[in-house]
Amino acid sequence: MISKPLRGIIPPLVTPMLDENTLDLKGLEHLLNHVIAGGVSGIFILGTSGEAQNLSYAVRKELIRQTCRIVGERVPILVGISDTSFVESISLANKALEYGADALVATPPFYYTPGQAELIQYYGDLADQLPLPLFLYNMPSHVKVMIEPETIVQLSKHKNIIGLKDSSANGVYLQKVMYLLQGRPDFTILVGPEEMTAGMVLMGAHGGVNGGANIYPELYVSLYQAACNKDFKTIAELQPKVMNVSLSLYNIGKYASSYIKGLKTALNLKGICSDFMPEPFHKFNKAEREFVEQKLAELDALILK
């Protein structure tokens, strides 16, 4: 059973891989135990950070199974089911139920750009058939459409739609969503971009789905707690550290995939999991890896002191 609202830091887990179609099971276990030990409130697999759309359906289902096995009942597990195929989304959802996950997450279907009326119809049809509660996932940079605030309000009335993960990085948009949903304290609002999570939690959001929590979970949990407590002194101490993670690791080279490459390289350098990336991407080369190693040493000195 998942709480309403779901609160805290829920890392969007990277997917450790050994090759194009083989999970790094030892790395997955290390990573899951690492973030849970850091105090996170849940796990989100098969999202953007997990390279879900680059994975075979067999790997996605195996990842759900192994994650549920390793995590057990320690924290809730959210499973991404975003797909261009309605049938495949339902199939992944049924596996999530079978293996013991707690909730589902779905972007709008991509490739063709749906209108808002079509989104309402799509999400309603999807939620009607899902065996677990659903979080809407607003990711306009990747799927070419924004789930408009009024659309979210309409969809929030569906009994099986329980929250929103917003990765738009648009603070005005998210403020409007929260304002329109102020009569729905049970409807979860989660923030994707870690750089703005503390500010949005201060304004009423319930938590963050922050990629950097793969590496430094304690940092993001502490910042979230400080925001909940309106502890501005601690926020002022921790927010620059979060910004340092972002500025040091997420923009190396001119790649759309730089964020994930930075995360996976850092995790590999820490001995947690493999840094293999499935096609169409590839892990950093030697010079870029050495740059990440240098930045990681600086971050460790700043964050782990």
Image (spheres, rainbow, N blue to C red):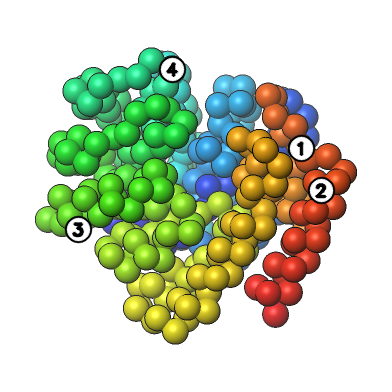
Q: Amino acid at mark 4?
A: Tyr
Task: Of the two numbered discs 2 and 4 on the same chain, state the one appearing first in sequence.
Answer: 4
Q: Nearer the viewer, mark 4 or mark 3?
A: 4
Mark 3 and mark 2 lie on one chain; the one further toward the N terminus is 3
Q: Position of residue 116 (x, y in %)?
A: 22, 26
Query: Which residue position is annotated with label 3?
Result: 185
Sequence order check: which comes first, mark 4 or mark 3?
4
Q: What distance separates the C-alpha of mark 4 from that of mark 3? A: 34 Å
**In this orientation, does residue 31 appear?**
no
Q: Between residues 217 and 112, which one lies in front from this camera angle?
A: 112
Q: Is residue 239 above or below residue 15?
A: below
Binning the other alpha carbons within 10 Å of mark 2 as few (below 14), some (14 to 19) or many (20 upward) gives some
Circle 2 sits in a helix, a strand or a loop, which is it? helix
In terms of sequence position, does the residue under pointer 4 or pointer 1 come before the other?
Answer: 4
Report which residue position mark 4 lands on.
111
Marks 2/4: CA–CA distance: 33 Å
- For the residue pair 244 and 11, the one nearer the viewer reads as 244
